[in-house]
């Protein structure tokens, strides 16, 4: 069990049935983190640069992603999937990036911090929601299609959960649960029986 007032990022170690604080030597705060389907831990840290690091050994060591350009700004969200398909949000834009540091802008006009950016770990599709915009990419985040308005687009989605059989579940801050059986094109309100 974690200490009552624990701060930082902890990893669970099953062999010892305990939690261990991950030590960082970056000299900055961690803004956001994500874990990709391969189990790598990705971090965006608070600094004057857009510093993104990843660890393939559950946080024991980290490598910095050296971007090919400067995208100064606080990284608000990060979503990771593979060596070649990852995304971050900064300065009102969504950027696609690769582990080799290649970066390109893919969405502009992000208006506030109420942002959902999440990969489907089974298919690699990625979903973006912000201020009524609802988009999906089926090529890892390089190109995007607008999804039609649904009851879900007027809500604030907390998290998407993906099932291996293809269903997608959406949990909203308003307490609603929605589901989709067509990769996010249509959504239905799930009513508890």
Image: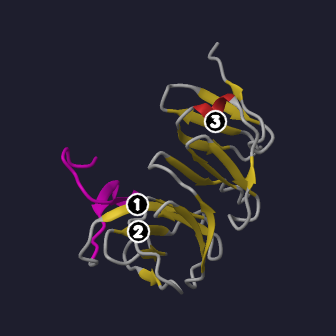
Tag 2 residue? 44
Residue 153's disc number: 3
Magenta residues (range) = 1-24
Whether residue 162 is situated above or below residue 139 in the rendered picture: above
Residue drawn at x 73%, y 58% as measured from the top left? 144
Task: Give the image's coloring scheme.
Answer: secondary structure
In x, y percent, where is residue 105?
61, 70
Residue drawn at x 61%, y 43% as measured from the top left? 161
Of callouts 1 and 2, which one flags the residue occurring earlier in the amino acid sequence? 1
Q: Nearer the viewer, residue 164 or 99?
A: 99
Tag 1 residue? 32
Q: Secondary structure at mark 3?
A: helix
Q: Secondary structure at mark 1?
A: strand
Between circles 3 and 2, the one closer to the viewer is 3
- Relative to 108, is 89 on the left or the right? left
In the image, is residue 88 part of the stretch drawn in magenta?
Answer: no
Residue drawn at x 61%, y 36% as measured from the top left? 170
Q: CA distance from mark 3 to mark 2?
A: 28 Å
């Amino acid at each position: 069990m974690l200490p009552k007032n624990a701060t930082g990022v902890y990893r669970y170690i099953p062999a010892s049935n305990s939690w261990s604080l991950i030590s960082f030597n970056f000299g900055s705060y961690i803004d956001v983190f994500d874990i990709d389907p391969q189990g790598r831990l990705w971090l965006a840290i608070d600094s004057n640069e857009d510093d993104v690091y990843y660890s393939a050994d559950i946080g024991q060591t980290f490598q910095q992603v050296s971007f090919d350009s400067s995208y100064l700004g606080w990284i608000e969200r990060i979503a990771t999937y593979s060596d070649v398909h990852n995304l971050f949000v900064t300065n009102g834009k969504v950027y696609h990036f690769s582990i080799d540091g290649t970066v390109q802008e893919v969405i502009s006009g992000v208006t506030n911090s109420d942002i959902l950016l999440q990969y489907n770990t089974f298919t690699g599709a990625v979903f973006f929601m912000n201020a009524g915009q609802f988009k999906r990419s089926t090529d890892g985040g390089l190109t995007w299609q607008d999804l039609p308005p649904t009851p879900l687009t007027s809500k604030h989605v907390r998290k998407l959960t993906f099932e291996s059989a293809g269903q997608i579940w959406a949990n909203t801050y308003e307490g609603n649960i929605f589901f989709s059986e067509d990769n996010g094109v249509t959504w239905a309100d799930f009513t508890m029986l």
